[in-house]
Amino acid sequence: MAEFGRHPQLNRNGELHHLLSIEELPRAILERILTTADSFINIAEREVKSVPLLRGRSVFNLFFENSTRTRTTFEIAARRLSADVFNLDITRSSTAKGESLLDTINNLTAMQADMFVVRHASSGAPYLIARHVAPHVHVINAGDGRHAHPTQGLLDMYTIRHYKRDFTQLTVAIVGDILHSRVARSAIHGLTTLGVPEVRAVGPLTLLPGGLEQLGVRVCTRLEDGIRGADVIIMLRLQNERMKGALLPSAQEYFRNYGLTPEKLQLARADAIVMHPGPMNRGVEIDSHVADGTQSVILPQVTFGIAVRMAVLALVSSSQRMQ
Amino acid sequence: MKLAIRNGRVVDPASKVDERKDVFVDDGRIVAIGTAPHGFSAERTLDATGLIVAPGLVDLCARMREPGADGALKVESHAALAGGITGVVCPPDTDPPLDEPGLVRMLRQRSREAAGARLYPLGALTAGLGGEVLAEIETLAEVGCVAFAQTGSLPHDNSVLLQAMRYARTFDLPVWLRPVEDTLAGRGVAAAGAVAARLGLASVPDVAETVALHTVFELQRATGARIHLCRLSSSNGVELVRRAKREGLPVTCDVGIHHVHLIDVDIGYFDSNFRLDPPLRTSRDRDAIRAGLADGTIDAICSDHTPVDADDKLLPFDEAAPGATALETLLPLVLKWASESKVALLDALGKVSSTPGQILGEPTGRLALGAKADICIFDPAEPWRPEAAALVSHGKNTPFSGYELIGRARYTLVGGDLRFTRK
């Protein structure tokens, strides 16, 4: 175990070298990312929407699982930092020819990659990659299995901070398919690290993994209990495939019990904000009146996402070598 | 060949002997313990000063990768010797599965040629291990299978399991089962609980084990079949076996050595060396396993040795092949457990020698007068690290890579033949 005892994400100086998960990152690093993102928010409004921070660096988007949205926002973020961006649709190329994950990584490193933005269907895949890349290369997790989606978690934190300022007074409800959701896990770690006193996980028992309480959340099985008095409601996307097995009988019944409607939203605080990582299933987890209503901050989340991803790319690339 | 083993501390769990004695071997058998027989003149003498002379270990589950990988049996059976193991039970989940007499004869022939540890093949309970059609188990027993196993999980179809148990009972053949209910285990790769929830890994709930145990015990009550349960993993499972034994069901069980030590938290950051089958459970489960060993609920400890190609571990956790190399770490890990749990050496070694021998119904795992001289002579204090270069087995992946282990075989004898000497 060569990596025995080594932090998978931080270098010896405690700087963020890879972003793999929000879990186990110190609060100071999360706050630094959020503050750095502040400085990038304005760039989007300028005529020249780029800064030369990553000029000459190569960022490879490695998506082993399809995603248009996350890949595009990473691409925009990298381009605004003046990096050279390469998009590789791995689902259709190398692995189909039987090349192993690490062989793919080694080949791309030989093409002078500086940074890999990785999405993979297996939980933990970015850890494996980070353990094996050259010491100057950075790995950013863009979603691994059910495990983590740290930039989504960070943009959620950025959004909450933007509207609510102080994390230490908040009640946050995360509603839906917690079992399969990397977004939920990253949000939970972000919220608990930043000092949110009450994080609630809301859903039917079939979609709540055992042992959830040990992550520092309160489990609620009824939506009404979960969102009562909440300052922030994070709705999760419900995949259609969940209705095929024995987890849920139908989208209709799910909506009846866990869909966020204007009436149910009344149970939350009057100034509560509603978030969603997208893409939304209107009429399944969220009613259109809520999605498009005044309390929805779903579109600002997307805008903030670019600034947060710029902050992450900029911060990891300024860290020293891993070894 | 006349052989004398002098000045060692003889530890024999079967006879409860633990004292400094000399052991004398002639013509493959133990001819005296204590004083040399009249007129005995040793052709070779092993100096066991500071060493322990114990029965060769009997491992109830080790994959030798044959049939499947040609030449693997020789390497793995010598890895067993290097671990002080003189007898290995190999499960039938080979390629192809061990479900017909020709394969068993071939395997036994290769084992004789390899001159490593003794091989005790388990025959497949169902054809191709498919869980649908019975294998010719009476014929397989005739050619040397010691018992009949369904690996992985119980047969999907309960009626097949019921008939298999009835049929095995007809010939009084033992059936070895993994208490895993496949529909509940699904494609899980980690035990259900906080760690799997945190890491986002598909999980195996402990009801996958307890429901399987209830099924097995009910069918046992109906058929009277003799059952050995392989690799128990949960606290609730241990309790069910305890009750079944109290009731008097003819059941024995084993646990893998890794589950005596490790828990789900040890997976750390998706370390695929900790991807095992059954998955590692919580500290509560590990403690229950240790309690089960102490009170005799769990009869034996096996290595569950599974050589895995290094490339098959260099994959994301859920894609990595499960299993670890363990023949050579079994002995030091048993010693580690004995010292941590304050178990007498005699009792600890019993879990890997005399009781496995009894479960097999084979005259091995004991140092008795007239018994075959299957002997392990080990240094109980030698520190070493199980790194790739230090291992004989083709399998190099172990959760204990990089750890310091204490205790290592020095000499291993099979039927009086000195087959392993550590340089």
Image (spheres, coloured by chain):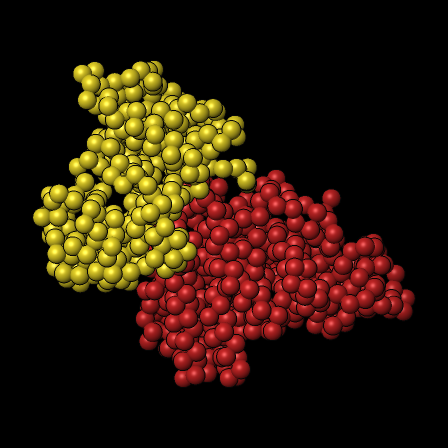
Chain colours: A yellow, B red
Q: What residue is at 68 percent from the left and 68 percent from the top?
A: B347
In the displayed orientation, state which residue is furthest to the right: B39
Q: What residue is at 78 percent from the left and 56 percent from the top?
A: B51
Classify B279 as above or below A190. Answer: below
Classify B38 as above or below A244. Answer: below
- Count the labels in the image: 0
Based on the displayed image, in which of its 4 quarters is residue B210 positioned? Answer: bottom left
Q: Nearer the viewer, residue B320 or A81?
A: A81
Based on the displayed image, in which of its 4 quarters is residue A221 positioned? Answer: bottom left
Q: What residue is at 32 percent from the left and 71 percent from the top?
A: B157
Split into 4 quadrants, where in the image is the N terminus of chain B?
bottom right
Q: Quick check: B92 left or right of A240?
A: right
Classify B45 as above or below A42. Answer: below
Q: Nearer the viewer, residue B401 or B283?
A: B283
Tell me residue B23's x, y (percent).
Answer: 81, 64
Q: Is residue A122 visible?
A: no
Tell me residue A298's x, y (percent).
Answer: 18, 40
Tell me residue A25's x, y (percent).
Answer: 43, 39
Q: What residue is at 70 percent from the left and 72 percent from the top?
A: B14
